[in-house]
Amino acid sequence: MKKLLGLAVFAALLTTVASARLLINGAGATFPQPIYTKWFDEYSKVDQSVRFNYQGIGSGGGQNQILSETVDFGASDGPMSDEKLAKAPRTLWHIPTVAGAVVISYNIPGAPKLKLDGPTLAGIYLGKITKWNDPAIVSQNEGVALPNDDIVVVRRSDGSGTSYIFTDYLSSVSGEWLSKVGKNTSVNWPVGLGGKGNPGVAGLIKQTPNSIGYVELAYAIQNKLPYADLKNATGHYITPSLNSVTEALASAKIPEDFRFSMVNSPGEKAYPISGATWLLVYQQQTNPEKGRKLVEFLKWAYTEGEKLAASFDYAPLPENVQKRVLKRINEIAY
Amino acid sequence: MSPPTISAAGPSPRAPSHAADRTFRWAALLAAMSIFVLIGLVGWELYAGSRLSIQKFGLNFLGSTTWDPVADQYGALPFIFGTLVSSLIALAIAVPLGVATALFLTEMAPQRIRQPVITVIEMLAAVPSVIFGLWGIFVLIPWLRDHFFQWLKSTLGFLPLFQGPIYGVSMLAGGIIVAIMILPIVTSVSREILRSVPNLQREAAYALGATHWEVIRIAVLSYARRGIFGAAVLGLGRALGETMAVTMVIGNRPDIKASLFAPGYTLASVVANEFAEATTDLYLNSLFELGLVLVLLTVLVNGAAQFMLRQLAGPGSGKIA
């Protein structure tokens, strides 16, 4: 009992010591959570006077919390809509951190390497291409034995940045998709089974013969799933990889406010289904101390932090974008 | 399930001048009341959170089959359908199985088998929902798809219930998973009910020359039927709200299909799936309204069950319901 009491006192002491450090709260997207957590952990060794607390509550929650100023920074996998951004009490900035890709995985006998283009993929997800040996698929995959079976379409059931990037891509390559379905973190899917999270989708693909689905690149690499090469805007078939995602970032058109879509980016080596993730930060910080620490951290993240991205299977920002982002960070006032 | 009322306690023979008595009475009353307060708060919070979508869609929300976050159009019907159907499948499987298990345990099983079986059933209740879901995806679904569903289709395929393509994940798979999850509660409540049947009943039936089966049917089951009905209602309550395991095996498609092989979606699952990334206000409000619909549905189903229970006149104890 005495021991327990001692432990409790010790724990209480620890928390008081810890709370003496400045606490900066953030919340939002789950997709970049592993790298953010790593950044905060590494940064706590660089600056011991500050502590970051990040809650992966989802992009929607991240946007709402930064709008109501219950957190010091938000995070989102998709850029905020104009309508939503208009609700911000002050100028709210989007700051891209890293990028990821969405890969097309499948389960067909022999697990051959497949090649697909955007219109074919849209056709499959619209329910118009229903057989694996459809001419649209066969013509791109000469020499591959494709079964005469129905395609079982799998997609995410939970709202997610992965679905946002994927539907953003389909909207950019298919007018019919854009008008019938559109892009969002979750949409009204014309066909398909829903799996919860990357593991749910991957599980359904593994367990269902003749299925096709989309998962995050990092998840596919870590779980050794087969995935297809995609035809990009310049007509090349590109294997998804961190390099081909950074290529897509480098050639994407990025506007001044950093709210950009990088799907179907025009680079020759760019993988077409990729997207960035953002931090949401107010241009005018209300708490000078927190503002200063946040800016210091962001500067560190874009110089040292970005180097850690690849080891967590995230594509770092290319140099030209990094420079622009650093310039923006320097404009944060506190 | 209704909390015991205080007034039934009656005046004590001695004048209730003891402070301890009074304190206890008030504390008990407070505890009983807190349930109403809690339910009221939950209901209010859900209503307040869904005001936008109630204003925009009105009653159409309940009848519409469209769920389109891009166009900001929301309707609850496929989810209500999926919740009811998967729960009914679960009940249809779990109640006969649970009551039969309970009968075996109270009427037939030798003492040394009884305790192990009870322990295993109680362990089933302690398995987390998500584990059932994972087991569902990796073990149950492949087996259902390759064997059980094929067999169903070839023998009962003339029914619209068992037609169409077989994916594995389906309304039926969702129902089966929920059945496994509510089995422990149905079994243990039924067992308590059966144990409460007085031995006099059984002895009287035996004295009349009844066989073992007749004793169970006439003396035990008919005496306990109200209580068993109550056990089923408790199971149904759990089935309606089951979330994680269901979403992993039901296919998550907001469709209304006659076939049980087709994927479906439930109220609780869609809220859990889409809440975190709901970005527009109307979207968020509609998800809140789904929660409100789920609470109302549960209240309605329980109310109907209470009503049926009253129709089911019998000497049985209304212990549970």
Image (spheres, coloured by chain):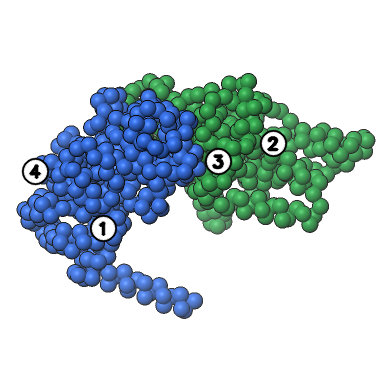
Chain colours: A blue, B green
For the residues carrying marks 2 and 3, which lies nearer the camera in this image? Answer: 3
Q: Quick one: label 4, few (<14), some, or many (20+) residues within 10 Å?
A: few
- For image coordinates 58% across by 21% down, the residue present is B160
Residue hosting label 4: A256
Instruction: Judge the density around disc 1: few (<14), some (14-19), many (≥20) Cα neighbours within 10 Å.
Output: some
Q: The C terminus of chain B lies in which quarter of the figure?
A: top right
Q: Looking at the picture, does residue B14 appear above or below residue A6?
A: above
- Residues under labels 4 and 3: Cα distance? 49 Å
**Mark 4 and 1 residues: CB-CB less than 8 Å, in contact?**
no
In this view, the mark in front (1 or 3): 1
| Circle 4 chain | A
Q: CA distance from mark 4 to mark 2?
A: 66 Å
Q: Amino acid at mark 2?
A: Pro
Residue B252 place in picture, x, y as percent: 44, 35
Please tell me in which quadrant of the rendered image residue A259 appears: top left
Q: Quadrant of the N terminus of chain B?
A: top right
In the image, taking residue B284 as reference, residue A248 lies left or right, namely: left
Query: Residue B100: x and y, percent?
Result: 73, 40
Mark 2 lies on a secondary structure that is helix
> Cα distance, mark 2 to mark 3?
23 Å
Label placed on residue B141? 3
The answer to whether residue B33 is above or below residue A306 is: above
> What number is the disc on residue B96?
2
Q: Disc 2: which chain? A: B
Precedes in sequence: disc 4 or disc 1: 4
On the image, which quarter does residue A262 sit in? top left
Mark 3 belongs to chain: B
Label 4 and label 2 in one chain: no
User: Which residue corresponds to mark 1?
Assistant: A310
- Helix, strand or loop for disc 3: helix
Task: Find the distance from the CA under tag 1 to the CA under tag 2.
Answer: 55 Å
Classify mark 2: residues with Cα within 10 Å, few (<14), some (14-19) or many (20+).
some
